[in-house]
Amino acid sequence: MARARRGRGEGCIHQRADGTWQGGVSLGHDGNGHRKRKWVYGATKKEVADKLDEIRNAARIGTLPDAGAMTVGQLLEHWLQAQKPKIGTRTYEAKESLVRVHLQPRIGGVRLARVNAVHVQQLVIELHNDGVKPWAARHAIDVLDYALSYAVGLNRITSNPCQSIEKPRPNGRRPAFLTEDQARLVRELSAGLPVHPLLVTALGTGCRQGELLALGWGDLDLTAGVLTVRRSLSMTKAGFVVKEPRTGRERTVALPRFAVDALVTLKAARLKAGLLSAPVFCTRTGNHLNKNNVLRAFRAVVAKVNDQLAEDPGAKSIPAAIRFHDLRHTVASILLSSGHSLRAVSQRLGHADPSLTLKVYAHCLPGDDGKLAEGLAKMLG
């Protein structure tokens, strides 16, 4: 394809065969006498011309970014290592997996100095065509976005091309939750099973699974009927890791009577077995519980509940794919739909801000518009 004629003062700009535009500017010579030229890319001729102007201005005042021979893959590795001390082990493993599985094979070989919005848009297309789940594709693009912003901060590139493309939009998953009758049956039909104390504590508090599995007996005051969340347990490739709770601060949660009764019985059994120094919810040998085993035990209880619900033609069964975390959603939905304070429920769940609770559980709030109309009628009518 013939190069498009450039205007006066534009430098070397031409349109490529794929319809995008490329421009170059000479930056003198390096120490070996070789000519230094920087190339930029864009969707339009004006975009390239503007980038060339930025480069000339930056070169003139001595702030020209220099990515050298670094590739996007090398940047991603550098960014991961920079993030490692700042984030949890599980979070690091998740980001490392996104880089290794989705980003390195598709865009890792591109020179950082040449990466542009077209490369990023092509990455989005390839992720979709390869059948990558929308949520995974979105997280992968987010990781690339963070890494490229990091490169801008290091003065390696002038701008982040992720900012000019539309990211994948995974379908939002509305939290699953049990009805009051279903939750009551889970509590009743799990009685006598090893998982019972954990299930009723989850239903009585709304705590996260990791927070429950990290509890020690020193975190419980069964006389006062409260537990204090101080830690959280996570499973990593290297094993169990006990860390601070997600919000980084402690919180105290009041326990309902049914949870206190189950925990009192459990404590007596642990005392008899000599396991009071072990986690509250532990294996027979006193080790931390594996969340996969917990899920299997929970779903076995759900199967019992569904068998009983099947005897009532009008009863709705619990989805077989229910997660343990959905017990937390159950507590939130029951409390909010019953008219309890959004702020109080948010504090119980350990959300950093009530706006997060509102965003996730707005559909559970009672519809009070009719009551508002009645109130206005009384005041103004």
Image (tube, rainbow, N blue to C red):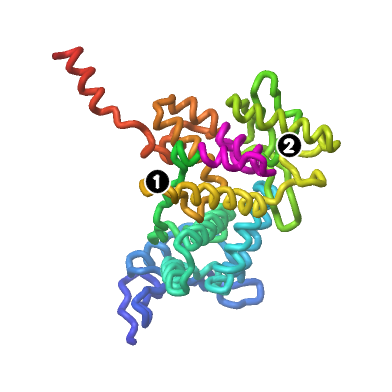
367 to 314, vertically: above or below: above
The outermost residue toward the left is: 381
Q: Which residue is mark 2?
A: 280
- What residue is rendered at 59% in x and 64% in y? 99
Q: Earlier in the sequence, mark 2 or mark 1?
A: 2
Kind of element beneath mark 1: loop
Other residues around mark 2 within 10 Å, as few (<14) / some (14–19) / many (≥20): many
- What residue is rendered at 69% in x and 43% in y? 194
Q: Could you tell me residue 73's position as x and y percent?
A: 60, 68
The outermost residue toward the front is: 311
Q: Along the line of sight, which residue is nearer the eye, 284 or 246? A: 284
Quadrant that contains the N terminus: bottom left
Other residues around mark 1 within 10 Å, as few (<14) / some (14–19) / many (≥20): few
In this view of the protein, can residue 60 be seen by the observer? no
Q: Which residue is mark 1?
A: 315
Q: Could you tell me residue 289's position as x and y percent?
A: 72, 47
Quadrant that contains the C terminus: top left
Amino acid type at mark 1: Ala
317 to 200, vertically: above or below: below
Amino acid type at mark 2: Val
- Asked whether 200 falls inside the magenta stretch, the response is yes
Q: Magenta residues?
A: 184-210
Q: Could you tell me residue 3's position as x and y percent?
A: 34, 82
212 to 166, vertically: above or below: above
Q: Nearer the viewer, mark 2 or mark 1?
A: 1
In three-dimensional space, the C-alpha distance between marks 2 and 1, rounded to whole angstroms, equals 35 Å
In this view of the protein, can residue 51 be seen by the observer? yes
Q: Is residue 202 left or right of residue 317?
A: right
Q: Main secondary structure of the magenta part?
A: helix
- What residue is rendered at 57% in x and 42% in y? 189
Q: Quadrant of residue 348?
A: top right
